[in-house]
Structure formats: structure tokens, C-alpha cells
Image (spheres, grey):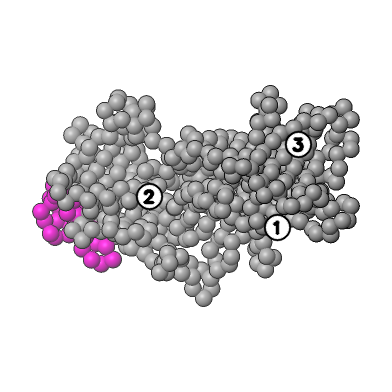
Amino acid sequence: MKKLQLLNWMFIAFLALQFTSCNNEPLEGQFPQQDTPGEIVPGSFTAIVNGVAFTAAFTTATVNVDGDFTITGVSSNNTAIVMTASPLATGSYDLTLNPTNNDNGASYFDVQSETFPFLTLGELGGNGTLNMTAYNETDLIVSGTFNFVAARAVLDGDGNPIVDGNGDVIIENATITQGVFNDIQMTFDENPGGGDPGGGDGSEDPVDVDEFFALVDGQEHVDQLLETTLNIIGDDMVFKVEAQTATGSMMRIDIPFDMGLGTFDMEDGISDGTKLIGIYNPNIGGENLSSNPGSITFTQFDTQSGIIEANFSFTARDPLGEDPSVYQVTQGSFTIYFEGTAPPALVPFKALIDGAVFEPSGVNDTLELAEQEINGMNVTFITATLENGRTMKIGFPSDTITPGEYPMSTEVANGDQTIGLYIREGSSIEFVSNPGVLTIDSYDQETGDISARFNFTATNPDGVDPTVIQITEGVFNLNLL
């Protein structure tokens, strides 16, 4: 959901930084000298907040070329009132934030606190009115009055919303009345979109803004907090895009680092944290509900430039089947920007043998490619041998194989089968795949680059050794030319 900078609420962190880190710098803005709320003097900004007088010690106001107006009043005890209106003109503005009104809104908060601000969110009962009584377009001076009720969820010590006995989120309000600002001098922002402040219209370096939108059973999931993180789980890197509403409802999409462009099915049920999955929690006392089914289409996926764009939908259900609730998430879309990350180095060959790592990375370990013609077909064998003699071999028809899943066989008789083999230390007995799966993730026959995964249960077909060996989490990334 695209918002003005104020209504994206990252502006709050900016304000906190400005008003707590400039002790040694002169402040710019207006500093009214009166201490009486409601006293009308040039530069004044006063109100009553929950019955207590609020007098701004510092006031700032801006308007940009699009007419977007923002006014901020900060008191001596570091509480702040912020309002936006667009386009700026004399008249009345409805400050109730809802899916159809993102331009006009208000908030009240402590600039030194990390808790969410009180917002005029309609879904929480917030509302208000801003009356622009005077606007001098030539001298950029404004005056007006305002009243609003702002709300937020009550949080516990861990930052989670508190619910009552009926499972409803407890809401607290801030009531602002008798608001007046008089003859406030504005600054004109010629560069509302960001970029180089001295570079004309700023089009050369626009600021990228994350966007998120989704409907839950036809109602918009209005995100107040949108966060993207890149987590490392074992050997996997996973993006987590999380959008949380003011009432604590949460929607999250987990995206493996190496997904790429295209349409993919989401994981059904429970994920180990590394799978592509959609998660929703309505925050009514239950557990996370996960995609079952769900799909997502990535239209941009550039981890080096730092942008992912996608459309998604999923049905959210309890993966354990204990909660009968079912939610339909539709029309989902997001665009996220992040610091470009170089892809992790590809592992040439690695697997787990009964849970122990098998990887030819030592000085005396070897990794060899060989091609053999079987029944008129070229079969490539990848052979990894460790210094102690343990050997693993993967075979597949390199001329015909394409990305996809292939069941492994116990032999390569026709030339079109895939196979896995393993030889233990100090032995010549072959254990072959029975069963097994080879998954080709990508293969470019022109360049020879191939990436694949494999798992197989290895047994001795001759019955000489009854041992059953589990080969799991196998992977190879090689060039076959």
C-alpha cells in the first residue's frame, strides 16, 4: 500500500532522530514564546491532549509541488502532533485514515519512544478534522484549527497486542481538542520524490518506497509496519516480507534467496523456515495460519540490484488442523527494495551421509567428470572421492536431461536413467540408489552450467552388505564442458 512519507510512519523515526540528536546544532523553525494553550500569536501551535495542555516548543511545516502539506508540533516534553493534508488549500479535511484516504491523517506520539504512534485509523475508531482557515500562497503562511481522536493497540512487554477475554485487541486513545496553529511559516519542498536536493526535479535519484497490498476475505490488510529481512537458516538464505496492521494482524511471505522469476506454488502446511510459504495471523488469540494452497508470481527478482516484485494469493489454514478458521488472501502484491546482496558461493558438490557431511574440499579430495555412451546416449558421471577413499557418484543423461525431478534407478541400462552410487571407506562394495530422486534446478547445455539436488537411499543390490545408507541434502553446481 503506497502512502505519503508521514503515513508510511518511517517518518516517525526520522523525527525522533532530528529532535534527539541535534543538541549542538541550531534548530530551524518557529519557537513561540507563549505558554497558554489557545493563545493566538504568530507561530503558535497549541492543543489539549487528553485534558492536558500541549504547546509546541518547535513547529515545522512543508508543502511540495504536488500540494502535499505536513505540519509538525513538538512540545518541550518530546511529545509530537503531526498532520498531513493534500492538496493544500483553505477548507476542511477529514483526517480519518482508511483504504480510500491516505493523503489526510494525523498522529500523536512520543518522539523518544519506540512504541507505535496513536493514529487516526478508522478501523480502530480514529477520526478527526483539520480546518485550514488561512493560506497565503505567496508568503507560504498557514493558519488552522484541528481536533482528532487517534488510537493504537495496547502492547505487552514483548511488543505484542493485548487481547481481552473475548479475544478482541485492547485499544487506547489519544483525544486532541482545541487545536490551533497560527501564521506558521512553511518551507517549499521542490524534491518530494527524493534524490539530489540540488539536482533540479530530483528525477535522477528517486527514493524507492516499499509497497504491500492484500485483501483478507475481501477487506484490505492495511499495513502500518512493513519490514523485509534476510535471514540465514543453516546453509539457506531466506527473505521474510512481513506486513503488520495497527491491530497486530500479520501477513508474511517467506522467499528463498534463489527463487528467481516465474510462478511457484507455496509450501502447504508447516515450513522449516527455508520454504516458500505464505503466513497469516489475524491476532485473535490463535496460531499462525499458513498457505494451503497458495501461489506467487515473481515479476522482478534481482538480489544484486536489490528489488523483488511479486503477485500472490493463498488460502490460510491451521497447518495442525486445530483451528477451523480459514481466510482467503487475494490480490496480493508487493515491491520491496533492499541493499543488493551478492549471491552466496555455489557449492561444487556436497551431501550428508547418515547426517554426516560429505564434501570433497580437502587437498587430496577429487571431483571428476566422465562421459560414457550407453545405448547410444551420452551419460555423464560426477564422481566425488575423499582422501579416505569414500566415493559418491551421480549419473544422468546429459544430452537429454532438462530442469525437473527424475527418479533414480538401481542401474543405467538404457542410458536414459539417473543413478546414485556410494562406496564406503576401505571397501569396494557399491551401494546404489533404491529409491532416490535427482532434481535438476537449472541446466544450460550451451554453457554447460548445471545446478542440481539429490537424495537417495543406498543399498547393496547383491545383498553382500545389508547396511542401508541415507544420502540426503545432496547438491552439485558444476560446469560439464
Name the residue tied to disc 1. 354
| Residue positioned 30% across, 48% down in the render | 14
Position of 56 compared to 356: left or right?
Answer: left
Name the residue tied to disc 3. 381
Q: CA distance from mark 3 to mark 1?
A: 23 Å
Q: Within the magenta stretch, is there residue 57?
A: yes
> Are the residues at dot 3 and dot 2 in contact (C-beta closer than 8 Å)?
no
The part of the chain drawn in magenta is 31-58
> Are the residues at dot 3 and dot 1 in contact (C-beta closer than 8 Å)?
no
Query: Where does residue 230 sit, x and y in percent of width and height?
Result: 49, 48
Depth check, front residue: 40 or 284: 284
Disc 3 residue crowd, few under 14, some 14–19, many 20+, Cα 10 Å: many
Instruction: Identify whether 56 is placed above or below 439.
Output: below
Instruction: Identify whether 414 is placed above or below 463.
Output: above
Q: Quadrant of residue 246?
A: bottom left
Q: Say which label, 3 or 1, has the lower sequence index.
A: 1
Q: CA distance from mark 3 to mark 2?
A: 56 Å
Depth check, front residue: 406 or 265: 406
Would residue 348 be visible to someone looking at this image?
yes
Instruction: Identify whether 276 is placed above or below 399.
Output: below
Disc 1 residue crowd, few under 14, some 14–19, many 20+, Cα 10 Å: few
Depth check, front residue: 35 or 322: 322
Q: Within the magenta stretch, is there residue 168?
A: no
- Of all residues, the one furthest to the left in this rendering is 33
Disc 2 residue crowd, few under 14, some 14–19, many 20+, Cα 10 Å: some
Name the residue tied to disc 2. 9
Please name which of the two marks, 3 or 2, marks the residue nearer to the observer.
3
